[in-house]
Image (spheres, rainbow, N blue to C red):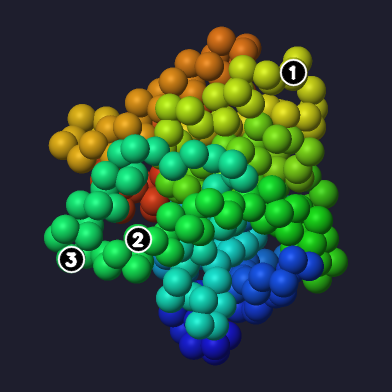
C-alpha cells in the first residue's frame, strides 16, 4: 500500500491504527518538500474524511514552496477508515464526526427520502445511516486524535511542540468546530469547511452560548477559519441552504461571545462536493502562514 501511494501521492506513507475503543483507522502521513534533508521540526495538520479528502488535500503540500504564498511547513495527517470499512466511510463518519446527542436535521431526513425515491439510496442504506447517527461518538474520536494518535506521531516524526492544526469539511467541519468549542486540544488553528450543523436545535449553539472567557487553551481558543460556498447559500438544494443558515447563526453567536479576533471567514465559489480542496487551501492561507 505504501509503495502504491508513494507513486500517487508524493512523500506519503500509509499505516493503520487501532484505537483503544476498538475502531481501526487508515492514516496517510504526507511530509513537506525537503523534510528528509532538513532538521527542522514542523507541526502536524490533521485532515478528516481521509477516504474522500486525501486525494484533494495531500497534493497541496507543495504550496509550501509556492513563491506567491507564505504557507508554513507542516506534516499532513489524513485520517480515514481501513480495510472493508473504507467503502463504508460515508456511514461511519456519522459515528466519529457527529457529537453525541446531536439531532439530525429535517432537511437531512428529507434529502434521504429523496435519495430513496430516485434510487440513489436503498431503504436499508437510509436505515443504517439514521441508526449510526443515533450512536455518535465525536468525543471518543477526538480523544483518539489527541490522546492516542498525536502522541504516537509526535514520538515517531520530527514534530514541533506547537502550531498544530485540524481541518474538516461538512460533518468533518462540524467535528472541527466541536473540537474548537470543547477545547483542551493541541490544535492552535482549526479549519471548518461548511460545518454540517444540520439542525436548528444543534447543541453547538448551546456550546457557543456558554463559552467562558477566552483563555490560551480552553474552549474557543486558537484561530478558527470557517468557509461556505455560494451555491450552498443561494442554490436550490434545501439541505445545503439549511446548513448555510445554521453556520451563519453560529458565526453570529461567536461574534456575540467576543471571539471576532480569533475568527476568519471566506465565501468560496464552489459546490458542497468541490469545495473541500478550496476550503483547505483557504484555511492554509489564512491560518498556517510563516
Residue drawn where x is 43% and y is 64% of the image: 128
- What secondary structure is found at the residue carrying circle 3? loop
Indicate which disc, 3 or 1, sits on the residue closer to the N terminus: 3
Query: Eyeballing the image, is 221 above or below 285?
Result: above
x, y percent for residue 206: 60, 23
**Residue occupied by mark 3:** 119
Q: CA distance from mark 3 to mark 1?
A: 47 Å
SS at badge 1: loop
User: Given contact means CB atoms under 8 Å apart, are the residues at marks 1 and 2 in contact?
Assistant: no
**143 sits to left or right of 127:** right
Mark 1 sits on what residue? 212
Image height of 13 relative to 160, above or below: below
Name which quarter of the figure residue 260 lies in.
top right
Q: Nearer the viewer, residue 237 or 157?
A: 237
In this view, 104 is above or below 13: above
> Badge 3 local density, few (<14 within 10 Å), some, or many (20+)?
few
Distance between mark 3 and mark 2 Cα atoms: 11 Å
Amino acid at each position: 500500500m505504501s509503495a502504491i501511494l508513494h507513486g500517487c501521492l508524493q512523500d506519503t506513507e500509509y499505516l493503520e491504527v487501532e484505537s483503544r475503543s476498538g475502531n481501526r483507522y487508515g492514516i496517510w502521513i504526507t511530509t513537506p518538500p525537503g523534510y528528509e534533508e532538513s532538521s527542522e521540526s514542523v507541526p502536524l495538520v490533521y485532515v478528516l474524511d481521509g477516504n474522500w479528502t486525501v486525494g484533494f488535500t495531500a497534493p497541496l503540500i507543495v504550496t509550501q514552496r509556492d513563491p506567491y504564498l507564505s504557507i508554513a511547513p507542516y506534516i499532513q495527517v489524513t485520517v480515514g477508515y481501513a480495510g472493508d470499512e473504507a467503502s463504508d466511510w460515508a456511514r461511519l463518519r456519522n459515528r466519529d464526526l457527529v457529537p453525541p446527542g446531536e439531532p439530525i436535521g429535517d432537511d437531512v431526513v428529507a434529502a434521504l427520502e429523496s435519495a430513496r425515491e430516485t434510487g440513489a439510496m436503498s431503504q436499508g442504506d437510509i436505515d443504517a445511516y439514521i441508526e449510526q447517527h443515533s450512536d455518535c461518538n465525536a468525543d471518543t474520536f477526538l480523544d483518539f486524535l489527541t490522546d492516542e494518535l498525536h502522541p504516537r506521531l509526535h514520538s515517531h516524526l520530527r514534530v514541533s511542540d506547537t502550531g498544530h492544526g485540524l481541518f474538516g469539511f461538512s460533518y468533518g467541519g462540524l467535528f472541527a468546530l466541536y473540537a474548537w468549542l470543547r477545547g483542551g486540544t493541541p490544535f492552535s488553528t482549526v479549519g471548518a469547511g461548511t460545518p454540517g450543523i444540520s439542525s436548528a436545535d444543534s447543541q453547538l449553539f448551546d456550546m457557543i452560548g456558554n463559552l467562558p472567557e477566552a483563555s490560551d487553551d480552553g474552549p474557543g481558543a486558537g484561530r478558527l477559519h470557517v468557509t461556505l460556498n455560494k451555491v450552498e447559500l443561494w442554490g436550490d438544494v434545501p439541505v445545503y441552504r439549511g446548513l448555510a443558515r445554521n453556520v451563519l447563526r453560529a458565526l453570529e453567536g461567536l461574534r456575540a461571545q467576543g471571539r471576532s479576533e480569533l475568527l476568519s471567514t471566506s465565501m468560496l465559489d464552489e459546490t458542497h462536493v468541490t469545495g473541500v480542496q478550496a476550503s483547505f487551501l483557504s484555511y492554509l492561507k489564512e491560518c498556517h502562514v510563516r
